[in-house]
Amino acid sequence: MTNQEIANQVKELYEKIDKQTEKLAQTTGLKCPPGCGRCCENPDIETTPLEMLPIALELFQKKQFQELIEKADTVNWEGRCIFYEPDLFIAGNGRCSIYAFRPSVCRLFGFAAVKNKQGGAELAACRYHKEIMPEMVQKVKESIAGGLPVASFSEIAFQLSNIEPSLGNQRMPINQALKVAIQRVGLMAQWETGER
Ligand code: SF4
Ligand code: SF4
């Protein structure tokens, strides 16, 4: 498969995830406060190079690779996601500069389930949701226990790894995953144009 074909499959899966999480939000009323970016501030977010392939390809096609490489020395690759733009005036708020391309963890977080000890689906609740709307979180948990359909982290991970196991099985910090995806896109492009 070409990088583009792989990225298309990843994006199709993203659309499915969005439908599932939107359904959960609509059915239960669970939502994030406007502008909240607390989850993006976590420096330990992990994903796979596969999931960063669509944005790496987009940057490559829009010829923004060079821009990224030029600012690479000033970027803290070990810290939080480089695509996060914090609100300078409101602590905890911020925006994702690649929203349409964000990986599955960013789509699922707070709105998807993990397996509990009994093997059932249990909401992996966001800590901030629990703090500001504990009753809502409890209601969502009860609805899921009662059979409300919910996206599953493990099922999505499985489906992603099936698209391209060599890229979809390696979990690593998000910026690192981006680097691997960029490297792959760059190398494949060189390969395709014969610049070896
Ligand atoms: S999932 Fe939690 S931390 Fe992330 S935006 Fe929503 S409320 Fe904020
Ligand atoms: S990709 Fe976007 S949503 Fe995900 S951590 Fe980075 S800034 Fe946040």
Image (cartoon, rainbow, N blue to C red):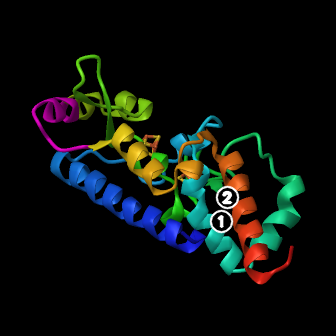
Secondary structure of residue under mark 2: helix
Report the side of 107 relative to 134 (left or right).
right
Report the side of 87 relative to 190 (left or right).
left
- Quadrant where the C terminus sits is bottom right
Q: Are marks 1 and 2 in contact (CB under 8 Å)?
A: yes
**Which residues are drawn in magenta?**
139-150
Q: Residue at x 59, y 49 (%)?
A: 166
Report the side of 75 relative to 116 (left or right).
right
Query: Which corner quadrant of the image does residue 191 belong to?
Result: bottom right
Foreground of the two, 175 or 74: 175
Report the side of 146 relative to 164 (left or right).
left
125 w.r.t. 98: above or below: above
Q: Residue 123: x and y, percent?
A: 29, 32
**From where the camera sits, is residue 97 visible?**
no
> Which residue type does callout 2 highlight?
Ala
In this figure, which residue is indicated by the disc labeled 1?
56
Disc sitting over residue 181 in the figure: 2
* Distance from mark 2 CB to nearest ligand 2 atom below 8 Å: no
